Structures are given as structure tokens and as C-alpha cells.
Amino acid sequence: MATFDQTLRLKIENLGVPVQSGTVSDVVLSIDQVNGLENFPDIIPVTNFVKEFLTNYPNPNDFYQNISNNLTKAIINNSQTLGIAGTFDALSVELLREPVGVLPYPFVSQSIQTATGNSDQLVKLQFQDLLIPVQGGTVADATININHVDNLGTFPDIIPLANFATDFLTNYPNPNDFYQDITTNLTSTILNNAQALGLAGTLDSVSIKLERSPGSVLSDLFSSKSTAIPTELSNNALTGQAF
């Protein structure tokens, strides 16, 4: 006999969220339902709950990480009322925000909660058309992915990291380096400066991906990605295992 795994994905576009002077976001709700589920719940109550929660969010100074985390917890806490109790293994909420004045880059915050209460928080920052002074000056898109430690309660401000990364790339000092050198050096430098950036103790991993358009030296699409995992040496010192 076959068993079935059912995943639902609901996308709500252009939703006004009253934080950071009022921002407009796309919201993606994903539900991984328990294996072999035969009676599926009505999705409309949880859809309405998500819209109501976000459009009437009460804390205007919260970060997006707080919002996605609070929403996933609220869904689980109200799962009985919403008719989804016992029907899911995990659910996630992604908030996709377009650039705004404070943070002029596309930004994604994703919170994943299991039915047993464990949480995982992911953040993605995208920088487009950065001029990097290597190989005669190349233009690249950069993506930073942050996987926070499980069950993190207080989230760091992402703006210092965004400013640090763009400054590092646009003022890169070694014009003959390969993109592999750049991604490795940036991830290592972020870990070495984690305390100053407000990230110390919050990271499971950080990754940098550079995507470069074809150029005269390499006439093909090219990307380089470096992922580093912080290892605590002392209260203030961090090193990284990169791969």
C-alpha cells in the first residue's frame, strides 16, 4: 500500500503590513501535512487568519524575522480552532519584501515551525548589479543566506550586515582574485566580525553566492557559493568551517 505526503503552498500578494512605516509584502504559507492523511482540512480559515494577523500586526518596530516567527507560532497555537490540529508535520511562513528606503534590497524572512514546537529561522538578502573591482571590474548579483540557530528568540538587525557586505564587495582589495576567493573571504570576514555586526551567537550558518553574467574572459553564466558554519572558541571569538 502506498503512503502519500501532501504539501500545500499558499501565496498572498501585495499585503500591507504595518511595520517599519508600513511595508508591502508577498506572503507564502507552506504546510507539510502528515503522511497518509486522508481527510484534508479546509484551507480558508488559516488563510483568513494569516491575512488578519499581518494586516493588524501590533508591533510596528518589529523586524520581519519577529513577524514570521510570531505568525507561525500563532498558527500552531490556534491549530485546533483553525481545523488543522494533527494534520501537519511542519509549516513555514515566508515574507518577501521589496526594497524600501531603510533597506534598499529584496529581502526574505522565513520561519519554519514543527508540530512539536521546534523553530528554524532563515533570512535571505539579495543585492543586484554590484560592481566588484576584480578581473577588470565585473558586475554581479550577490545573495546572503543566514540560517539562525534553532529556537532563537531575539533577532538581530540585518542592516549592519547588508551595509558591511556591499562595502566589502564594492571595495574588494585584490583585483586578481577569483570569485571563489571573494565568497570565501566574505563569509570568513562576516564570522570574524559577527560580534560587531550583532550576529554573534545567532548563526547556524551563513552563505554568500555571487552570480556573474558572461564576460570577455568567461563567456558563460557563472556562480560561486561559500557556506561557513561558526564554531565557538570562546565567548567572543568565532571561527568558521567553510565548504
Image: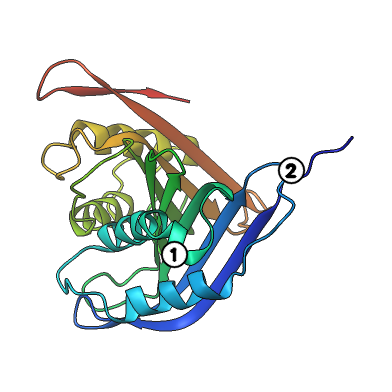
**N-term mark: 1 or 2:** 2
Q: x%, y% of residue 88? A: 57, 49
Determine whether the residue tagged by mark 1 lies in a helix, strand or loop. helix
Residue 53: image quadrant is bottom left
Task: Say few, some or many: other residues with alpha carbon within 10 Å of mark 1 (under 14 / 14 to 19 / 20 or more).
Answer: few
Q: Are marks 1 and 2 in contact (CB under 8 Å)?
A: no
Q: Residue furthest right?
A: 1
Could you tell me residue 17's position as x and y percent? 31, 79
Residue drawn 56% across the image and 75% down it: 44
The residue that label 1 is drawn on is 81
Nearer the observer, disc 1 or disc 2?
Answer: 1
Residue at the image position 44 percent from the left and 64 percent from the top:
81
Q: Which residue corresponds to mark 2?
A: 36
Q: Is residue 34 above or below residue 185?
A: below
Out of 28 and 217, give the one closest to the viewer: 28
Q: Which residue ends up furthest to the top in the rendered image?
A: 233
Q: How is the image coloured?
A: rainbow
Answer with the quarter of the image where residue 158 lies.
bottom left
Query: Does 243 sit left or right of 174 as displayed?
Result: right
Answer yes or no: is residue 146 visible.
no
Residue at the spot x=23%, y=63% of the render? 63
Q: Quadrant of residue 163?
A: bottom left
22 lies above or below 131? below
User: Is residue 94 or residue 46 the one in the foreground?
Assistant: 46
